[in-house]
Image (cartoon, rainbow, N blue to C red):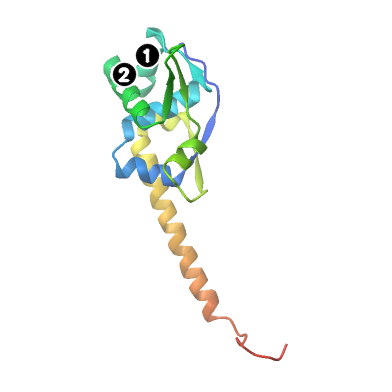
Amino acid sequence: MSKLILKRNTLLIPVELCEYVMRDKYFAPFSLYLALKFYFMDVFVLTTEDLESLREILGYDTIKSIKNNLRRLYKDGFIGLDQVTKRWHVRGLEFICRKYRFQSRTGVFFELSDIKNIRGFCVATVAASIIKSKKRKRWLQGSKKSCHCRTGSKNP
């Protein structure tokens, strides 16, 4: 059983980050990143016991999968490593949004219980965002048509 202690209950995940994860098929590294955000606030050292706990939480077959995804997260800037102390640090979502130049501030709450279904979460998030934007566009177009005021009129 997992020896890791949960540090937070929910995370606010930017919709554009979910789009990025889907586009680049980044599901496995992203689920590890989220697990690290839930269990380690900022700086951490991974022990063999921690790796085993993360493997159980994420449902991976081997610890090698965790290590491979850690390398990918490091390469892509989601986590950093202090070369002197050999401590990892989890980069914040704000940093990642700036690094990848995400524009939108829209986000969705994510709970740890969804960690094994990250693909479904991302798909649902992006689909809901598309539906919401289409509804907003339709509403804006409808409100322009029903405007009874004259434009360019000099009379108040």
Q: Kindly state the secondary structure of the residue where label 2 is placed.
A: helix
Q: Kindly state the secondary structure of the residue where label 1 is placed.
A: helix
Question: How many numbered tags mark residues here?
Answer: 2
The residue to which callout 2 is attached is 67
Query: In which image quadrant can residue 71 be found?
Result: top left
Q: Position of residue 42 (x, y in %)?
A: 52, 22
> Would you place residue 109 above or below residue 116 in this image?
below
Q: Position of residue 87 (x, y in %)?
A: 46, 15
Residue 45 as seen in the image, left or right of residue 26? right
Q: Residue at x 32, y 43 (%)?
A: 22
Residue 62 appears anywhere in the view: no
Q: Residue at x 27, y 16 (%)?
A: 64
Nearer to us of marks 1 and 2 is 2
Q: Residue at x 52, y 48 (%)?
A: 105
Q: Amino acid at mark 1?
A: Leu
Q: Position of residue 5 (x, y in %)?
A: 52, 16
> Outermost residue toward the top?
48
**Quadrant location of the N terminus in the rendered image:** top left
> How many C-alpha atoms fall within 10 Å of the one at disc 1: few (<14), some, or many (≥20)?
some
N-terminal of the pair, mark 1 or mark 2, is 1
Label ID, residue 51: 1
Callouts 1 and 2 close, C-beta under 8 Å: yes
Q: Amino acid at mark 2?
A: Lys
What's the CA distance linking mark 1 and mark 2? 8 Å
> Would you place residue 153 above or below residue 9 in this image?
below
Label ID, residue 24: none
Q: Residue at x 45, y 37 (%)?
A: 96
Residue 16 as seen in the image, left or right of residue 28? right
Residue 45 appears anywhere in the view: yes
